[in-house]
């Protein structure tokens, strides 16, 4: 009995210093982080949660159950839900269908261009579809070209989007039949003579554009009189108008600009019509909106890259358009078509409640990109999601590949260079908001899930990252229990 008592005393004697040492290390980490916050940002609200993904031990927290605007951190929730529900190999299908018959190279009936919400669809993909029609022997189409974007609703803007947070291109419509991210590329170069309007060119000069271009530019010889080009759209009338204003110097280099399209489905149809001409196929019908008949026959089909590949572009580059389409896709696949902001929100909330075990009434999720200032989440909720994803054997390792790698790629390419190979994270930035969440390895090789949220700051985001968020990440990476 005495030997057993002595053994227990020895174990206790050895364990207490070890526990105390770990506790002291955590206290030092806490003090170092608090010091960074104090010196970097006194006016804003800071929320932080850091958890070991192996033991679920909370390493550090501050306001971790307080709600913050998550900004683009929402994208990881959208993607995680999509990967889990749809699968990493899910692909969008864009097809050309017909309700007619082909006789002697002539299609008697309509063609239907049907979209499924592919955010990555580009002009070349449409040309491949037309080439496939030509290869199966179609030389002439006697009918109309019906563009079908019914998989999504037509509401372009989500609740809570603010002008200061959306660029000109960010207002592009997330249509189920989007082409080139619902944008049109134009080149603007100075005219050859002074006082003449600038020259406006496109890569598809023969396409019948579903909008008018109002060129109000002027070419000048005096560089002092130059005014920056400004492009606006007017969608109030029957036909959209793209207005280009400003002055260019005679020696100015050509400028490439992206312009959002009011009706991307009609634009896609106009491009298809031009490709008919290029491949010597006769088509004199109209391009019109409509729905594909249930019994229509598929003639050609394009498949997108995998959902994982789409997700990597969406998260690494923080692509809002991809996130908008994926959000509505979730709504369509879970709630039924058409996909909408409302059905996407419902699908995401149900996923978080049923799979991640988060209480949906404790958060607000109105879009898939994070542009809405009505979105609200706590640092603890985001860390809980990160931990869930880490332990999900179906998507965990693939999911992490969509995060930017410190000092290597995406939005972290030029940040946190010393943490290459040790940190993967997603940024979230808008006016007054600077956030970061992801995974970091400590000096001991322990993996931590972390979320850092700064709301209400008057400083530039670059300052917040440099003075507060990045130094905290460095502290986490340098943490050791030894």
Image (tube, rainbow, N blue to C red):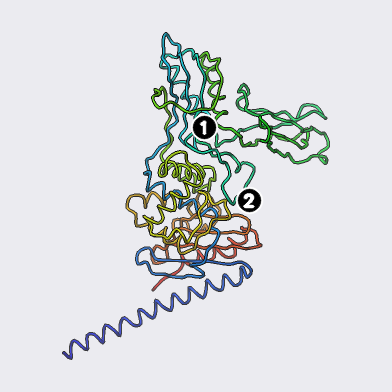
Q: Residues within 10 Å of mark 2 (few under 14, many from 20)?
A: some
Q: Which residue is drawn at 41% across and 39% down?
A: 306
Quarter in which the N terminus is drawn = bottom left
Q: How crowded is mark 1: few (under 14 residues within 10 Å), some or many (20 or more)?
A: some
Question: Extreme left residue here?
Answer: 1
Q: Which residue is drawn at 18% across and 88% down?
A: 3
**Foreground pick, 479 / 160:** 160
Q: Earlier in the sequence, mark 1 or mark 2?
A: 1
- Residue 162 has which mark? 2
Residue 40's quadrant in the figure?
A: bottom right
| Residue 133 percent across, percent down from the top left | 44, 19
Quarter in which the C terminus is drawn = bottom left
Mark 1 near mark 2, Cβ–Cβ under 8 Å? no
**Foreground pick, 10 / 328:** 328
Residue at mark 1 to residue at mark 2: CA–CA distance: 28 Å
Q: Residue at x 31, y 81 (%)?
A: 15
Q: Where 216 sits versus 404, above or below?
A: above
What is the tally of numbered marks visible in this picture? 2
**Foreground pick, 219 / 456:** 456
* Residue under numbered circle 1: 122
Q: Where 247 sits versus 467, above or below?
A: above
Residue 454's quadrant in the figure?
A: bottom right
| Residue 466 percent across, percent down from the top left | 59, 61
Number of the front mark, 1 or 2: 2
| Residue 380 percent across, percent down from the top left | 46, 64
Q: Where 141 sits versus 45, above or below?
A: above
Question: Extreme bottom residue here?
Answer: 2
Left/right of residue 112 with respect to residue 286 in the rendered view: left
**Mark 2, secondary structure of its residue:** loop
**Foreground pick, 39 / 290:** 290
- Residue 82 has which mark? none
**Mark 1, secondary structure of its residue:** loop
């Amino acid at each position: 009995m005495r030997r057993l008592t002595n053994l227990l005393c020895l174990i206790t004697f050895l364990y207490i210093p070890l526990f105390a040492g770990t506790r002291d290390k955590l206290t030092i980490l806490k003090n170092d982080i608090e010091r960074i916050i104090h010196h970097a940002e006194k006016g804003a609200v800071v929320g932080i949660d850091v958890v070991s993904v192996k033991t679920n031990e909370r390493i550090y927290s501050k306001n971790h159950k307080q709600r913050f605007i998550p900004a683009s951190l929402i994208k990881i929730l959208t993607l995680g839900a999509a990967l889990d529900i749809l699968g990493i190999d899910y692909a969008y299908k864009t097809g050309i269908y017909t309700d007619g018959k082909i006789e002697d190279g002539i299609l008697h009936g309509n063609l239907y261009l049907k979209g499924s919400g592919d955010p990555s669809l580009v002009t070349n993909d449409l040309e491949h579809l037309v080439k496939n029609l030509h290869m199966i022997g179609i030389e002439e189409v006697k009918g109309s070209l019906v563009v079908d974007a019914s998989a999504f609703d037509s509401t372009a803007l989500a609740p809570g989007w603010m002008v200061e947070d959306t660029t000109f291109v960010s207002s592009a419509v997330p249509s189920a039949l989007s082409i080139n991210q619902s944008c049109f590329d134009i080149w603007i170069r100075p005219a050859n003579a002074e006082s003449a309007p600038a020259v406006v060119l496109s890569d598809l000069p023969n396409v019948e554009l579903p909008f008018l271009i109002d060129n109000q530019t002027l070419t000048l010889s005096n560089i002092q009189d130059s005014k920056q080009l400004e492009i606006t759209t007017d969608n109030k009338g029957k036909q959209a108008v793209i207005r280009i204003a400003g002055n260019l110097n005679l020696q100015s280099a050509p400028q490439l600009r992206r312009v959002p399209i009011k009706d991307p489905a009609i634009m896609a149809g106009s491009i298809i019509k031009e490709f008919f001409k290029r491949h010597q196929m006769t088509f004199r019908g109209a391009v019109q909106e409509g729905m594909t008949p249930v019994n229509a026959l598929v003639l050609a089909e394009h498949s997108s890259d995998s959902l994982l590949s789409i997700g990597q572009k969406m998260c690494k580059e923080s692509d809002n358009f991809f996130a908008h389409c994926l959000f509505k896709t979730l709504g369509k696949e879970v709630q039924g078509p058409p996909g909408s902001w409302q059905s996407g929100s419902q699908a995401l909330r149900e996923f978080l409640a049923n799979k991640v075990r988060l209480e949906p009434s404790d958060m607000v999720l109105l879009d898939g990109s994070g542009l809405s200032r009505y979105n609200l989440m706590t640092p603890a909720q985001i860390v809980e999601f990160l931990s869930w994803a880490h332990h999900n054997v179906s998507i965990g390792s693939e999911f992490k590949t969509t995060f930017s790698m410190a000092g290597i790629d995406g939005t972290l390419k030029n940040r946190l260079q010393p943490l290459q190979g040790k940190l993967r994270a997603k940024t979230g930035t808008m006016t007054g908001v600077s956030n970061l969440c992801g995974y970091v390895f400590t000096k001991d090789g322990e993996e931590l899930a972390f979320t850092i949220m700064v709301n209400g700051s008057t400083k530039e985001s670059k300052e917040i990252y440099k003075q507060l968020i990045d130094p905290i990440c460095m502290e986490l990476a340098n943490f050791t229990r030894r």
